[in-house]
Image (cartoon, helix red, strand yellow):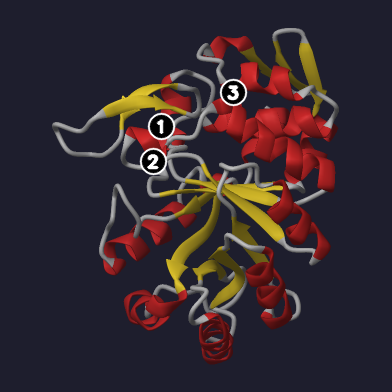
Amino acid sequence: MTALRTLLAGLVDYAGLFPPAELPMAPAVENYASYRSGAHAWMLGRFVLPVARLGEFAAAAAGQLPAGGEPWWLAGLVNTASLRADIAAAADFNERHDLGAVVDSFELRAADAATIAEAATLLPRGAALYVEVPLDPDPAPLLDAIAEHNLRAKARTGGVTPDAIPPSAQVARFLAGCAERGIVYKCTAGLHHPIRARYPLTYKPDAPTAVMHGYLNVFLAGAFLLHGMPEGEAVALLDETDLGAFDFADRGVSWRGHRLAAEQLGAARTYATAFGSCSFDEPVGDLQAAGVLR
């Protein structure tokens, strides 16, 4: 379906190195290579890793990187304390790997406008920088700084403990703030499943459970906000637990009387780029199990 494909294309950045999967480098690289050649490769985005582990990645990926055509696009996590060195290391990596793999975006946690301004001065030409901001208190001042420097925003939407999952109102406030300012954004953590529900937070047999955000909820809320939905209604969309309330068709998607055309979804995806997930199988498999995706 055109609308569903528009919403999901390239949406899942694979973060298998991170909790709760927390795989070693070699199996994470093998997984990514397998996903790239699989039936749902069109849903796959970047491979996420700390820039400090690029050497380890290069060793694990030797012989698997493409010799031509589409390279492996990498999202590199950088630290405030080593920002200049991390960006230099990524540039060196790109030069040495001759486009078989390319770090073309960076991700940085920042809690003040000064850090954001400094990072903007160090960003290589053509690269994107996603600045992860806390959702509480109100991130409006940080979003202002991100917009001022033409950077991108990142929100953490979950974690391996219940208290790491932000309330829907905070997620809606972040999404509305990005829509207001025309900020490109991504999300990370806790979005393994398409619809809001209670799930285990880790893969351990005795894992705690909690109500987690669904990636369809989050990215459709962002799309509707961009096209004029009030923030309060976006909270209700984020709280939706019935997958059947979302009706995808070739010409668009509907939710409880609200509708977006496929073209509007496409416009929204230029702002909502991806979510980081340590699993690619779960985001795909849940939709298949529900009969939404073949």
Q: Secondary structure at mark 3?
A: helix
Between 212 and 147, the one lying in front of the other is: 147
Label 1, label 3: how far apart the Cα atoms are = 21 Å
> Is residue 220 placed above or below 99 in the rendered structure?
above
Query: What residue sits right under mark 1 in the picture?
Result: 285
Residue in the picture at 73% in, 63% down? 151
Image quadrant holding the N terminus, namely top right
Q: Nearer the viewer, mark 1 or mark 3?
A: 3
Q: Residues within 10 Å of mark 1 (few under 14, many from 20)?
A: some
Do the residues bearing badges 2 and 1 touch, measured as CB atoms within 8 Å?
yes
x and y, in percent, of residue 264 in the image: 83, 33
Left or right, 11 with respect to 271, comes to left
x and y, in percent, of residue 10 in the image: 61, 49
Quarter of the figure with residue 260: top right
Label 2, label 1: how far apart the Cα atoms are = 6 Å
Q: Secondary structure at mark 1?
A: helix
Residue in the picture at 25% in, 64% down? 24
Under mark 1, the amino acid is Gly
Disc nearer the start of the sequence (2/3): 3
x and y, in percent, of residue 60 in the image: 32, 75
> Is residue 2 placed above or below 85 in the rendered structure?
above
Query: What residue sits right under mark 2 in the picture?
Result: 281
Q: Residues within 10 Å of mark 2 (few under 14, many from 20)?
A: some
x and y, in percent, of residue 72 in the image: 53, 68
Any part of residue 4 in sight: no
Q: Residues within 10 Å of mark 3 (few under 14, many from 20)?
A: many
